[in-house]
Image (tube, rainbow, N blue to C red):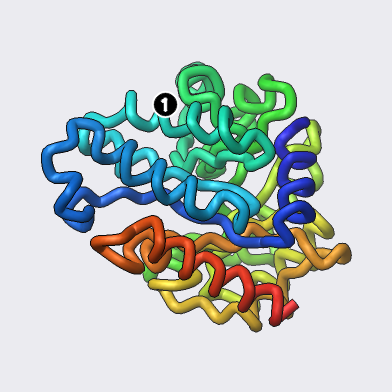
């Protein structure tokens, strides 16, 4: 299955729009992992095993691994997911964006080295910076559109040809960049009005919605604004609120938090 097909299947099989973000922070690991040379893999694999039947995807954040020289542990983690939960797509949160010749190497990193099913990209350099990722059949690209960080409006809310820049990104995605049918967009959970506007522009294109949980995104508002016509169409990400729900028993805490979040999402939809 390609990325979009796998995502659709996971939405249905697990009755879930929840994505668990894998943002490991060794300072917050249980004491028993203090002397584990593969602590990042061990911690994340526990979370994956505890929540795999409750999610539609996993989203490892590459910087949380690379900063600790744990790229091999990231490779092994994605392999663990593919081997044990082959129906759950993996979105590598890398936010790459560079000229075409460099993007070719970033694409190989995401799809060959790490074997991710999709990767997040920054589209600021335009269409030619995205082309190398589209050369991998069936792989997804998830483009930053309207983010929820405090400074996002510096650029994303600028007027460009009678529309906001984030709206221009949404229009370009559906009109030009989605040639393979494998695109999705990132829209922050704290921007429900913009979620609705992006949904108007892109139809049923999947939207990755970070910011639920620790960042306080309103699930009911997200669903009201962003559901696709099928009732799905959303990848609602929660990271810290699930990973660190119980420091000494991370798997149990993560499962309880993930189930609670998934069920709340389902009640609201």
Residue sitting at x 80%, y 33%: 179
Instruction: Answer yes or no: is residue 138 visible.
Output: yes
- Choose between 57 and 80: the one closer to the eye: 80
- Image quadrant for the C terminus? bottom right
Can residue 176 be spotted in the picture?
no
Q: Is residue 136 above or below residue 65?
A: above
Q: Is residue 95 above or below residue 221?
A: above
User: Relative to 96, does residue 18 appear above or below in the rendering?
Assistant: below
Instruction: Choose between 93 and 49: the one closer to the eye.
Output: 49
Residue most extreme to the left: 35
Towards the viewer: 96 or 52: 52
Give the image location of residue 230, x and y in percent.
87, 63
- Tell me which residue sits at (44%, 43%) in the image: 60
| Residue sitting at x 75%, y 59% | 233
Quadrant in the rendering for residue 160:
bottom right
Answer with left or right where residue 244 lies relative to residue 119: left
Q: Position of residue 227 (x, y in %)?
A: 76, 69
Number of residue marks:
1
Element marked by disc 1? helix
The residue wearing badge 1 is: 75
Q: Is 133 above or below relative to 208?
A: above
In the picture provided, is 54 more to the left or to the right than 103?
A: right
Where is residue 175 drawn, in percent x and y? 81, 45
Q: Quadrant of the N terminus?
A: top right
| Label 1 Cα neighbours within 10 Å, binned few <14 / some 14-19 / many ≥20 | some
**Image spot of residue 104 (x, y percent):** 53, 18
């Amino acid at each position: 299955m390609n990325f979009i097909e796998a995502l659709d299947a996971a939405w249905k099989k697990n009755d879930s729009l929840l994505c668990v973000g894998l943002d490991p922070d060794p300072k917050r690991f249980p004491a028993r992992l203090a002397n584990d040379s593969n602590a990042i893999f061990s911690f994340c694999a526990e979370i994956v095993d505890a929540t795999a039947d409750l999610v539609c995807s996993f989203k490892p954040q590459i910087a949380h691994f690379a900063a600790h020289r744990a790229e091999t542990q990231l490779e092994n983690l994605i392999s663990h997911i593919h081997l044990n939960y082959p129906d759950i797509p993996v979105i590598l949160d890398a936010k790459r964006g560079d000229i075409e010749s460099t993007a070719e190497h970033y694409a190989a990193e995401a799809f060959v080295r790490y074997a991710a099913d999709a990767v997040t990209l920054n589209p600021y350099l335009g269409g030619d910076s995205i082309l190398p990722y589209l050369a991998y059949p069936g792989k997804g690209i998830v483009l930053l559109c309207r983010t929820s960080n405090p400074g996002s409006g510096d650029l994303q809310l600028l007027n460009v040809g009678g529309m906001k820049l984030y709206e221009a990104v949404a229009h370009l995605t559906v009109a030009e960049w989605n040639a393979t049918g494998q695109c999705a967009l990132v829209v922050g959970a704290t921007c429900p009005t913009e979620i609705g506007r992006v949904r108007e522009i892109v139809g049923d294109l999947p939207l990755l919605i970070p910011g639920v949980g620790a960042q306080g995104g309103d699930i009911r508002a997200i669903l009201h604004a962003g559901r696709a016509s099928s009732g799905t169409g959303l990848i609602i990400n929660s990271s810290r609120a699930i990973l660190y729900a119980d420091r000494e028993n991370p798997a149990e805490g993560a499962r309880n938090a993930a189930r609670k979040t998934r069920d709340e999402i389902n009640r609201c939809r």
